[in-house]
Image: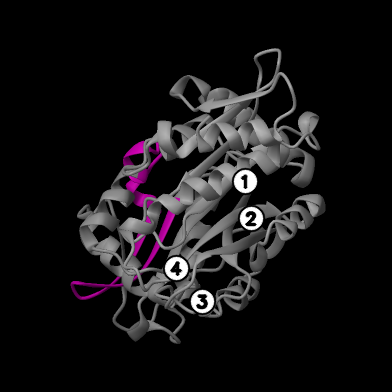
Amino acid sequence: MNTEAMIWSQYLAPGFSARPTTLADAAAATDVFNAASLKYTGKPHISLEQTLTFWHLPGFELARHSRVVVAPDGRVVANVDVDMTAAVPVRPLIWARVHPDYEGLGIGAAMLAWAEQCARTVFPHVPPDVRVSVLSVGIPQTAVAAHRFLESRGFCHTRDFWRMVIDLKEKPPTPAWPPGIVLSTMAQHPDLRPIVAAKEEAFRDHWGHIDQPLDHAEQKMRHWLESDSSHDPESWLLALDGDQIAGICLCRQGDHSDPDMGWVNILAVRRPYRGCGLGMALLQQSFNYFFQRGFKRAGLTVDASSLTGATRLYEKAGMSVQQHYMDFEKELRPGRTITTAHE
């Protein structure tokens, strides 16, 4: 019996089995994720399109990096994915959910053990003196049993993220643009590369950031962009200083958990342009974009301990915390840290 088979046989109850995920499992895996989300947050979390987009991410190999657990009646009751697609994969991400009807049967323990084994396969692809850890991400604050379970397996609570929302009951304020800054959109400037470069530069000050080759970052962003069936180039806002991008606010039409909500995917301001109100102007411009198109709310996700003070900006703009998620980390190999502000 190989190592993987031993893991599953050790934890799974009789009649349950695990196998590599296939594209035919997409709907079932999405349903499992949303059933768990409904239990702990009261809202679904992802769409079928988003599941398939992630599974087709460049570098993600479904047969190697994903597993489903099948109940005795043939029903898919759990799914686990390990994202190791970073250019230097020093922090693989675990996305795992068990259907609420099947909690407490050892399925979570089996998936976590398999995910750790899968994550260790990055070792040959990371310099030998660099620290490697694994991150179990997006755990709702209300899933207390999951927190305790992760801690019992050697994980530590390492970061909090907030889903923040604002109601758009009336026309949002008109943005006040800093001197010299001109608003544009991707519709007028369709070249993706400078947008990616601006995002990567700004995100060097975000917790957990890892510098990566621009080609790699562009490939991943292009994949997400081209997979979004509702993408509107006018929703990708660009603040320009001459021919330079000073800041970006990349939005999408609607959110799976709330079709009346417009979503801010990325808001980033490059270092030389911070402290002059550009972030607020971009955010308010996104609110106006959503309001003009009939959305009743706008939302985003933010690091609750943002190194750039993003939470203060969003609160000042009138946003409030709707949901709270937690990340848990476990060191797999000690070494020097190359992620931003690890501590």
Q: Is residue 163 visible?
A: no
Q: Which mark is residue 342?
A: 3
Q: Are marks 4 and 2 in contact (CB under 8 Å)?
A: no
Q: In front of the other: label 4 or label 1?
A: 1
Bounds of the magenta span?
224-251
128 and 159: which is toward the camera: 128
Image x and y of residue 61, in percent: 37, 37
Q: Is mark 4 on a helix, strand or loop?
A: helix
Q: Are marks 3 and 1 in contact (CB under 8 Å)?
A: no
Mark 3 crowd level (few <14, some 14–19, many ≥20, 10 Å Cα) = few
Q: Tag 1: residue type?
A: Leu
Q: Residue at 24% of width from left, 63% of height from top? A: 213
Mark 4 crowd level (few <14, some 14–19, many ≥20, 10 Å Cα) = many
Query: Which quadrant holds residue 30?
Result: top right
Structural distance between the alpha carbons of marks 4 and 1: 40 Å
Q: Mark 2 points at which residue?
A: 168
Q: Name the residue under label 4.
A: 282
Q: Do the residues labelled 4 and 1 touch (CB within 8 Å)?
A: no
Q: Quadrant of the C terminus?
A: bottom right
Above/below status of 54 relative to 204: above
Q: Tag 4: residue type?
A: Leu
